Image (cartoon, coloured by chain):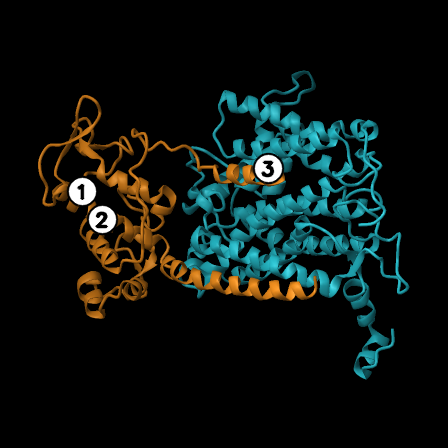
Amino acid sequence: MASKNSLMSWIDRRLPVTENLERHLTKHPVPSKVNFFYLFGALLMVVFMIQVITGIWLMMFYTNTEEGAFASVEYIMRDVEYGWLMRYMHSTGASAFFFLMYFHMFRGLLYGSYQKPKELVWLFGCFLLFLLMAEGFLGYVLPWGQMSYWAANVILSLFGAIPFIGESLQVWIQGDYVLSGATLSRFFALHVVVVPLLMIALVVFHIFALHEVGAGNPEGVDIEKYRDKTGMPLDGKPFHPYKTFGALPAIGVFFIVFFAIVYYAPTGGGYFIEKPNFEEANFLKTPEHIAPVWYYAPFYSILRAVTFGIPFLGITSKFLGFIIFAASIAILFIVPWLDRSKVQSIRYKGIFSKIAMIMFATSFITLGYLGTKPVNEIRTLIAQICTIFYFLPFILMPIYTKYEKTLEVPDRL
Amino acid sequence: MKKLIFLAFFISFFGYSAGENKCGELEKCFSFDSSVHDRDSLQRGLGIYKNYCSSCHTLRYLRWNRLQRDLDIPETVLIDDLISNENIKTSDFVTFGLPEISPIGAPDLTLRTRVRGDDWIYTYLQTFYQDTSQATGSNNLVYPGTAMAHVLIGLQGTQELDSNGKLIQLSKGALDPEEFDSAMRDLVNFLAYASEPARIERERNGIYVILFFVVFTAVMWLLYREYK
């Protein structure tokens, strides 16, 4: 590992820079053939950086008080040089984050990116989804608009629905008997410090764990099997420059779409920034229709689909909804132990796995659509059916993956 | 097949439409998309705003000097004709001396087009009609029971609902229907500008940012080809 450069060797004796650069970049082997689904990880890193940088910028001008929050956002939009750009990049970035995250995770489900020995990579990823949802929720409260206030009220009241401890738990989280300035300032602290720090730590774990077990590929072929004399897998290429340069055009395309939205449709037709949020929070006036931003819509739909409780156990419909809503995210965590298939990729799995994936994706999108609409009887019924279809692919996974007929996985990529 | 699924996914994504389309008693609002790039229209809109809106409504997030810069208003016109109050500085907000909370409940209009939408405001302003059961003597199709009087009656003339619930013109105002329509377009354009002054710069410069990334992508594509 000795470097010819004397400065580098001086540093390397004290800090293993060259060794780690080689380990994680220039000599880190990645599969030579992957498809576009494998670009979302890199794009997520880009979006994460956008969020951190624009977030710091916004934090410099934002006021985290009940009296000042709303006006400070307008101050950023009007009086701060390029403040509007920072804000729109941050709000569009939040939507982009979820969009890419959903594709990134769907890729994982399709190509078995959670299977042994990648369980931890998947688990850290699921934790990141959970943290991202928390981060998005906390951040949405900060502009202190009507939708910030009332959407937060809906979510916080879920904690209040927990039997026995619910009410005191809700007050403890809010820091007040109602959602107020006390809640706003603690949400600010959580949004800008606690959750982002946890996310950075988890991203590091996610990537270190990935580099330990090696990246997957759409074929589910183990590239470590055949190596050349230097130890590089025959179906592998060094991460840098092959994959880094491979990601750059994708990052370019992403930025074209991203800035097209930032500059020409920053509110996303009311789905990225909702209309009622341009009105300051008013605890005397409930908006006619409380809709979540699009990226929470599927989960919100699941929450609303539960219209019945279990009275003899003292479980209200609201609490049961909360449990099922939590389960819809929790179930993702145990996917590595639900899948009993001998093969990784959907390409070699049987027909039932394919049907299950289509079922899952369709119900997720339908739930998302329904989540943004006001409820009526038909929509509730469809949401209930879709909720079942959302869970079924996972609940039945141990059975169909074990018994379905799989195809032979080739030796080489 | 795969492409078809993705296509279906994207179409379903864009098929989402915000809430329901209903516009008060109307099936749909009159369609109108504001433009903030016609400076003359914005100036005319400001004129209508000052004459007809400013005695009740504020614009408390918009500053006079921002207005001056974006609408190209000469300093003398701004200070003498528009502000016409020596206690108000050009860096103050456009409140016309009204208190922060209106005693008659008139909302601040700075962000109103963003809350309601351009088309809602545009339709609202056009659909006042005579209704003696209301305290103000007029009612509105978009916002039934509105507390706002038909302040534009002098320009629009009086309207009435016929037995089918359609608006009919009773008497002529100072403007004929086309002129009134164009005046309302100016006013909503101005309000849309007030809700987001940065929109002028945003919509003007966005194309250069996008073009930059088109070139960036092309260069990066060539780099990628070298290392494929």
Host chain of mark 3 = B
First in sequence, mark 3 or 1: give its number.
3
Compare residues B128 and B60 and report the one nearer the observer. B128
Residue at 20% x, 44% y is B181
Q: Name which residue type carries label 1.
A: Val
Q: Which mark is residue B220?
A: none
Q: Which residue is mark 2?
A: B53
Residue at 61% x, 57% y is A250
Tell me if I can see residue A178 in this picture. Answer: no
Q: Name which residue type carries label 3.
A: Ile
Q: Is residue A211 left or right of residue B197?
A: right
Q: Quadrant of the N terminus of chain A?
A: bottom right
Residue A356: percent from the left, percent from the top?
70, 30
Write down which chain is painted orange.
B
Q: Which residue is mark 1?
A: B151
Tell me if I can see residue A181 in this picture. Answer: yes
**SS under mark 2:** helix
Q: Which residue is mark 3?
A: B5
User: What distance separates the C-alpha of mark 3 from that of mark 1?
Assistant: 53 Å
**SS under mark 3:** helix
Compare residues A254 and A197 and report the one nearer the observer. A254
Write down which chain is painted cyan.
A
Residue at 49% x, 46% y is A272
User: What distance separates the C-alpha of mark 3 from that of mark 2?
Assistant: 51 Å
Asked whether the beta carbons under mark 2 and mark 1 sit within 8 Å of each other, the answer is yes
Host chain of mark 1 = B
Q: Is residue A250 left or right of residue B122?
A: right
